[in-house]
Structure formats: structure tokens, C-alpha cells
Amino acid sequence: MSSHEQPRAGWAKFLHTTNGPIWYRGYFAADREKATSAKGASSKDKGATSKEIDLLLKHFDVENLIVGHTSQKQIESRYQGRVIAIDSSIKEGHYGEVLFIEQGKKWRGSLSGKVLPLYHQ
């Protein structure tokens, strides 16, 4: 059941589709391709290109896309730091991180309280 009284329309509908920039998993296509090829399969989606990432950033007038919904071992940056994956598997309860952004600099914060670098700054 949706929490919205009316279906999403316009930009909201685009942003929240599986191919919209929020839910799109092609940012992690290289990881998925390794996993599927190990199982003898292949994915149709080869992932976003660097040019496509640049178009999204320019269109939304932002420096980074910060995305979740695809678990990583830690917070990571992709596409030379333009895409930041923040789903650090905290939902599994074993580990997790938070992303700190201050004056344009980004860091990872661990559950133990350590502040760690986020590469590709």
C-alpha cells in the first residue's frame, strides 16, 4: 500500500521508477555483472555511462548523486566520486556507516565512531 493519496506524477513519477536516478541500480552494474557471470548469466543493463552521470548532475544542478538500495561493504564512491553509494549493509546489523558532508568534504563514519576517508574527492 502506498503512503501517497494519489499516484506520483510528473518528475516524482520519473524519479521513483526503477530506471529513475533514485532507484536505478545500474550504478553498480560492474558488481552485478561479476556476480551474474559467476553464475553463468548476463545482465542486459551494462550500467550508466560517465556521460549519462554528467547529464544527470547537470540537469539537477548537483555535484553528486547519493544513492542506496544496493548494499555495499562500506560507503563507497563511484564514477570518480560523482555517485556515492551509502547503503553500507547496516540493515543486517553487523556493520554500517554514515556519510558526513561538511563544506564540500565527505567522510565515512563507522559504528565505532571512527571517521574514515571517502575516496575520489
Image (spheres, grey):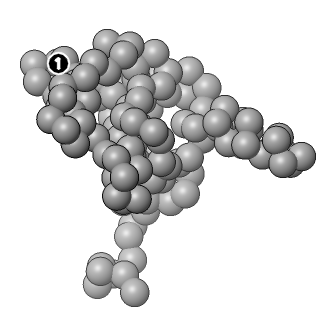
| Picture layout, residue 29 above or below residue 20 | above
| Picture layout, residue 99 above or below residue 79 | below
Which quarter of the figure is the N terminus placed in? bottom left
Where's residue 20, x and y in %?
Answer: 49, 50
Where's residue 50, x and y in %?
Answer: 56, 21
Closer to us: 13 or 119: 119
In the orientation shown, which residue stands out farthest toward the left?
103
Instruction: Give amino acid for label 1.
Output: Gly
Question: Which residue sits at x=61%, y=26%?
Answer: 49
Name the image quarter holding residue 74: top left
Question: Which residue sits at x=39%, y=77%?
Answer: 7
Where's residue 67, x and y in %?
Answer: 39, 43
Question: Which residue sits at x=55%, y=36%?
Answer: 27
Which quarter of the figure is the C terminus placed in? top left
Name the image quarter holding residue 64: top left
Closer to us: 16 or 66: 66
**Residue 62 visible in the shown view:** yes
* Residue tagged 1: 104
Position of residue 93 in the picture relative to residue 34 (left or right):
left
Numbered circles on residues, count = 1
**Residue 55 visible in the shown view:** no
The secondary structure type at the circle numbered 1 is loop
Name the image quarter holding residue 88: top left
Position of residue 110 in the picture relative to residue 76 (left or right):
left
Question: Which residue sits at x=37%, y=34%?
Answer: 75
Where's residue 51, x and y in %?
Answer: 56, 21
In the orientation shown, which residue stands out farthest toward the top?
121
Q: How many other residues sit within 10 Å of disc 1, few (<14), some (14-19) or many (≥20)? A: few
